[in-house]
Image (spheres, helix red, strand yellow):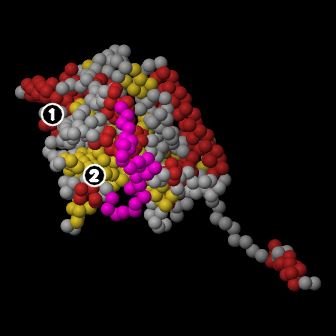
Amino acid sequence: MNSAEHQKDKIRERYKGLAEEELFCIPAKEQKSVFHSANIINVAAYARVSTDGINQTSSYELQRNYYTDYINKNANWRFVGIYADEGITGTQYIHREEFIKMIDDAKADKIDLIVTKSVSRFARNTVDCIGIIRELRNKKKPTYIYFETEGINTQDDNYEMALSFCATIAQEESHMKSNIMNSSIEMRFKRGIFLTPPLLGYDKDENGNLVINEEESKTVKLIFYLYLSGSSTQQIANTLMEYGRLTKKGNTKWSQSTVLQILQNERHCGDIIARKTWTPNYLDHKSKKNKNDRNMHGRRDNHEAIISRDDFLAVQKIIKNSKYGHKGFLPELKVINDGVLKGFVSINTSWANFTPEDYITASLSAYSSEEIDDVIEINAQKGEFDYRKFEIVRNQYVNSLNQVSVTFTPEKVFFSTECFKKFNYTPYIEMLINPTKNLLAVRNVDNTKCRNAIKWFRYSKNKINTRPIPGTAFLSTLYEILDWDLENKYKIIGQAKSRNEDFLILFDLTETSVLISQSSIRINHTEIPKCPLTTSGPKKDLVAYPKVWGNSFGKQYYEQQALKQRTLANKDWKITQEGIKVETHTELNTTSPEQVFNHIEKIKREIQKEVE
């Protein structure tokens, strides 16, 4: 017999065991149910009604009375209280104050048994329900829970399967109710039956329609006009508290968020939009902004307006731009209609409201149809050397640290230090774009006179460094105009031009190289790269050039000369020419600054008279 078989036989012999008469047994202590305990135990009850409506008050009170009597009938039960939540959802326990207090008391060994009507009353979230019960049951001094309807006592060892089943049913019931409620809301909104919560400036008539509250509407008007005049939300809040104006809830304390909510509520201009937020998860009830995740329904001119629609839309533009650091005046596009920068539109990197079409329309407005279609051809003159077979080498091919260049990312703009040198370190510049010719221009300006002035470098340790220019608001529009990929950076080599004392830098936005982060590239080796790539190190961006560049060194000589003449042919550059405001399709008929000021003063006088 081999050693393995021998070992198996020894194991079999050992597990035959001994005769019962050779052994003795010490009986286990009988585990009595908490219902039949000879000792006094502390018992509490938990009750909950799902809404705080009047019809639920009777249910709430009945549960309280029932459990008080139920616990007091048991001689060995000491009644420690009723924990009851009214008007609270069962899918989340974190918002149920009484529930949390009860669990904390149980963990502190103040409660031995909790009695509740059903699993759905206790918790509709399966994970929360089982997790809490396990935690209470596994304490050194356990706390058990008895569910009357289901007859489940968590003291029983086999409670968990039945509890899991019941908790899952309770959770699914909440899910179904949530779906039914969402369907009901959708049907209401689809038929124009909108919810009308309390809103400053309005009361509700007997039919639930919004009607203007004249006294409250003064506050609403003051808020909108102050914001249009350039006041911040905090300044407006301070003004409202100074004049003792009341919120809809009757409070005299105002905050920035309260003011902002009023400014963003379209109902003040007579319109109504329903379902601006939605709840993705019926368990946590956290709402999020509706970004086309659910249907939105609305109606224009649903009720009488307090603020004109154009003033409301103007305020939304200012709010949107304020996210990018722009404050004060309403955004506007200005185009230069004469001189070397004719057709160039001034850029404010904090403006996010204008579309690519707005910039193109503004640029085209500076030209006549003849100028747009004008084509200049330059060829070799008689007796001159013919350069038709020659090309101007692209600056991108010349790897020089002293290049005049600009780099765009979807968030920021970076100018090279050579740009500052060309401008003799002028601290402020203005960026202008000509979307019809795909050109970018930079000129120096006085920041006290130019609204769109940009500080483009900074001093650090007695050294001048490039200053990243924030431009998230505008740059997405620029990328769209030029059909650039938002995943990449774009670098353009510029040309510094001067005439007499005039100076500017021009960038041809069609002559770009692309900077691609190597960490973001996933190469499929079975594919041929779409454009040639170069790099100077594994940690640096890859530099990609357009595929068409592979067939040439640059523009044909006479083509380059024609471009130069079209751009810089003006005898008088008029480099300081100011832009003219352009009407775009997004133009609004807003209240004039003078009228806004008059409205503010009038409302303040009326409020002051009321106080006196």
Tell me the crowding category of disc 1: few under 14, some 14 to 19, or many 20 or more residues within 10 angstroms, Cα based: some
- Tell me: residue 371, above or below residue 100: above
Q: Position of residue 75 (x, y in %)?
A: 52, 49
What type is the residue that disc 2 sits on?
Ala
How far is the residue under mark 1 from the one under mark 2? 59 Å
Q: Which numbered marker is on residue 2?
A: none
- Residue at position x 69%, y 67% from top? 27
Characterize the magenta stretch by its predominant secondary structure: loop
Q: Which numbered marker is on residue 244?
A: 1
Q: Name the side, left or right, on which 51 lies relative to 23.
A: left
Q: Quadrant of the N terminus?
A: bottom right
Foreground residue, 163 or 501? Answer: 501
* Residue 347 appearing in the image: no
Q: Which residue is mark 2?
A: 496
- Tell me: residue 595, above or below residue 84: above
Q: Quadrant of the C terminus?
A: top left
Tell me the crowding category of disc 2: few under 14, some 14 to 19, or many 20 or more residues within 10 angstroms, Cα based: some
Q: Position of residue 22 (x, y in %)?
A: 80, 77
Task: Tell whether position 387 is magenta.
Answer: yes
Residue 399, located in which quarter of the rendered image? bottom left
Q: Name the side, left or right, on which 171 lies relative to 284.
A: right
Q: Position of residue 487 (x, y in %)?
A: 46, 50
Q: Which residues are magenta?
A: 374-403
The answer to which of marks 1 and 2 sits earlier in the sequence is 1
Tally of marks? 2
Q: Secondary structure at mark 1?
A: loop
**Residues tagged 1 and 2 counted as in contact (Cβ below 8 A):** no
Task: Tell whether position 429 is magenta.
Answer: no
Q: Position of residue 410 (x, y in %)?
A: 39, 48
Foreground residue, 558 or 310? Answer: 558
* Residue 124 appearing in the image: yes
